[in-house]
Amino acid sequence: MKTGDNILTTKERALAAALRLFSAKGYLGATTKEISKSAGIAEVTLFRHFSSKEQLFEEVLNTYSFLPTIKSLIPEVEKLPYEEALAVIALRFLETLKSRIEMIRIMQSEMSRYPEKIHKIYNSFIDGIIRTLALYFEGLQEAGVLKEFDTEYAARAFMGMFYSFFSAQEILLGKKYRKADLDLVIKEYVNIFAGGTLKK
Amino acid sequence: MKTGDNILTTKERALAAALRLFSAKGYLGATTKEISKSAGIAEVTLFRHFSSKEQLFEEVLNTYSFLPTIKSLIPEVEKLPYEEALAVIALRFLETLKSRIEMIRIMQSEMSRYPEKIHKIYNSFIDGIIRTLALYFEGLQEAGVLKEFDTEYAARAFMGMFYSFFSAQEILLGKKYRKADLDLVIKEYVNIFAGGTLKK
DNA sequence: TCGAAATGTAAGTAACCGCTTACATTGTAA
DNA sequence: TTACAATGTAAGCGGTTACTTACATTTCGA
């Protein structure tokens, strides 16, 4: 590697390029020639690091599958009023999705290729968030702030509202939402959800 | 066509097979040889009906893109109590999605191939539903049943909850939800949403 | 500075895919 | 029955793709 070059190793640059192209064109649509060119390396070098395109794809999944959960967010949000806390959680959730939009695109379009693997990645991400949020709800139920409801279903409903908003905006329409729109959406969604879960 | 054979024409069987395989394997993953074999016709016959694979794909989109709206549902639901009406709308929405799951899979994975066309199909489907539901909400707001909120955002939130449930169950996990689960999910989601939109 | 490891260049291979051509067979309407 | 339209069989063509081989060049630590 030339001095002053990118800090990333050859393998890391290959993985990053593969992530980009698999995301944009799908597994079959992204060719190894294209990936290596995009990574700025020779095609043969790609095959020196990865024994096959299939294995490259697997390593892309493994390398980028980690998604930050919102678990660390709960403690700092527990002191906020309910609706403000929900707004912060929603915003962080949307930011997390956006930061991993390439992985999400891959998961959406390559589901049939790697069902068990992608299923696992999806579950470890979603389940973590759902359970964390459900625990937050349970705490507020015990404190008498929220009425009785199934906390896990409620968590799924909450995340579902925002996921489908994200999906429509970022994946289907390709529109970048303006900050004002985003705030408005969060406010309206949180309002409905809070109204439906708070004790009267 | 032999007598006593399938009622469908050769072209229709080709389109149906193409829908199945494009949905299961993606545009690039489904070969013309495989599609014709699955349709029970010769590969050359496929190219007699469709000038290219690309045109076959376009005709699949055109043929199966029409999604029933829920517009016709509103009148018969207007007499029901709010929560029951929401439950019926949600159920019908989920049934519609399920009946067109192959098209939805194609739209999700081939977004990059036909962005404008798929975007159009998506919009004509979703926008119709959103606007219909928003009108229903407006009527109830004027009647003093619902509190004030942005009816379109609310409609998006409502559909979003159920779409993401559908997506998680049918597309990501491949699980068929049992009827009991479905009823429970609808009940919980509708409860939250109704609680957040009804006037206290 | 020197030698090994990493990377590049060039060429090629076997398989596959979309699509075509030429010709034979079958179904059906007049 | 005949003529025509629809479909089938078989073979192949040109292009692409994943992947390999052989060899030259660069990088860089010891």
Image: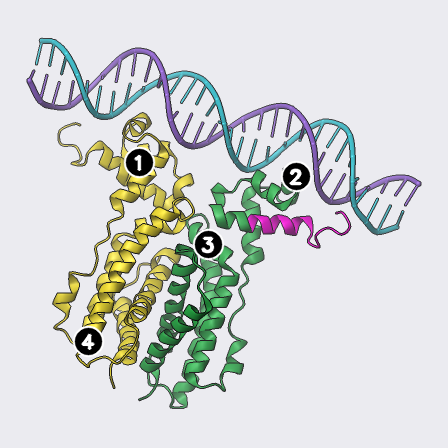
Chain colours: A green, B yellow, C purple, D cyan
Q: Earlier in the sequence, mark 2 or mark 3?
A: 2
Q: Which badge, 1 or 4, comes first in the chain's sequence?
A: 1
Which numbered disc covers residue A105? 3
> Which amino acid type corresponds to the residue marked 4 in the rendered image?
Leu
Q: Quadrant of the N terminus of chain B?
A: top left
Q: Which residue is mark 2?
A: A42
| SS at mark 4 in the image | helix
Element assignment for label 2: loop
Q: Amino acid at mark 3?
A: Arg
Kindly give the residue lying farthest to the bottom in the view shown.
A144
User: Is the residue under label 2 in contact with that under label 4 (CB below 8 Å)?
Assistant: no
Q: A20 and B87: which one is in front?
A: A20
Do marks 4 and 2 share a chain?
Answer: no
Marks 1 and 4, how far apart in space? 50 Å
Residue on which the image places disc 4 = B140
Q: Chain of mark 4?
A: B
Whole-number angstrom distance, CA of label 2 to CA of label 1: 40 Å
Q: Residue at x 44, y 58 (%)?
A: A119
Q: Residue at the spot x=47%, y=77% of the render?
A: A88
Q: Which residues are magenta?
A: A1-19
